[in-house]
Image: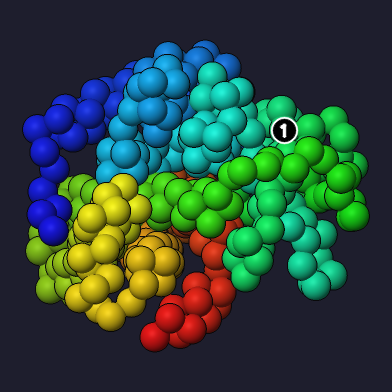
Amino acid sequence: MDFDLSDDQRALKDGIATLLDGVLPLEATRSAEHRADVVDPTAWAALAEAGVFSLLVPESDGGVGFGLAEGTVVFEELGRVLAPGPLVATTALAPVLPAAAEGIAHAVIDAPGRSAAPPLLEHPATCAAVVVLPRIEQVAEEAVLVPVGDLSATPVERSLDPLTPLASLATPLPVGTPLEGIDTAALRQRIMVLAAATQVGIAGEVVAIATEYAKGREQFGRPIGGFQAIKHLLADALARTELARAAVQSAAVILDDPLVAEREADTLSLSTVQLRWRAVAGAKLLADDAAITNARTAIQVHGGMGFTWEVPVHLYLKRSRVLASSFGTRSELADLLAALA
């Protein structure tokens, strides 16, 4: 596969970056920290108008008609600016839910499992409805749509990520409306790829922030970026980002193009179903690791400053942890890959 962006993809990347820098600068986003609703309606409307939510909807249905390969380009940029809100869920649901394609915020949660911990809903004050997705080992079952107003939810007083408000849901969940005819495996895979692309955006941005700081911060009369130890930290972080980016783009192409999936599966002596799960699980594992490890590295490069609230790197670390705990944890994805080995 050729992982260089096409001219159209580069234009898409530049266009969405310019839009986000205008409507969602991090300084403005941070002003909403720890609010019950952190989503700026004006910025959300601008994303809808730009076609972010209808990105994966076919043109015949009124959408933009792009594939996941282009979706990863857009969601890297959304991760770069820590865009708040249920962006992954709303965009992934848009091809099967017209309301989501119109920009009405939706959340996705896993069906409650055996754990005693209650399910958590992100952005409860923003979302109109929740799709309860069968757990990763039960993807053959139907997804269910539940209006947020039907849920019994208790706000979490202080969530890990101050830009991702949470509510604890009482179980059992309401019955809801079954989403008949929806390929829940394909839906989960779309969500995982978009979440992984967001992580790649986080991983790349924290490297950029740390590199810029290392160029300007001086010790012993020279920039700390000139010291070999700092160089190695940042070089390793960049390598992690590029590896994760390639894995995410590969997974997107495999999901987009049945012919690519068929040929790749034949090369690896796998079925196309096995190949898709292997590609998606591997991409999310690598992206989760790159985002979390690179954010830690950026904090280390900043030294004592890195642990202060004013330096935004901690926000990237917290968002990356939220994404890593959603739609396939490290242990769940490792188990899935082991089963496909």
Q: How is the image coloured?
A: rainbow
Where residue 197 sits in the image (x, y, percent)?
36, 50
Determine whether the residue tagged by mark 1 lies in a helix, strand or loop: strand
* 121 in relation to 18, above or below: below
Where residue 227 sits in the image (x, y, percent)?
13, 69
Residue 131 visible to an observer of this rendering: no
Where residue 230 sits in the image (x, y, percent)?
20, 68
* 233 in relation to 341, above or below: above
Which residue sits at x=50%, y=73%? 333
Type of the residue with mark 1: Ala
Please give left or right for residue 305 compared with residue 139 in the image: left
Q: Is 254 or 326 nearer to us in this picture?
A: 254
Which residue sits at x=59%, y=30%? 97
- Placement of the C terminus among the 4 image quadrants: bottom left
Name the residue carrying label 1: 129
Which residue sits at x=43%, y=81%? 340
- Placement of the N terminus among the 4 image quadrants: bottom left
Which residue sits at x=61%, y=61%? 139
Q: Is 167 or 50 nearer to us in this picture?
A: 50
* 56 in relation to 228, above or below: above
Please give left or right for residue 80 compared with residue 231 in the image: right
* Quarter of the image where one finds residue 182: top right
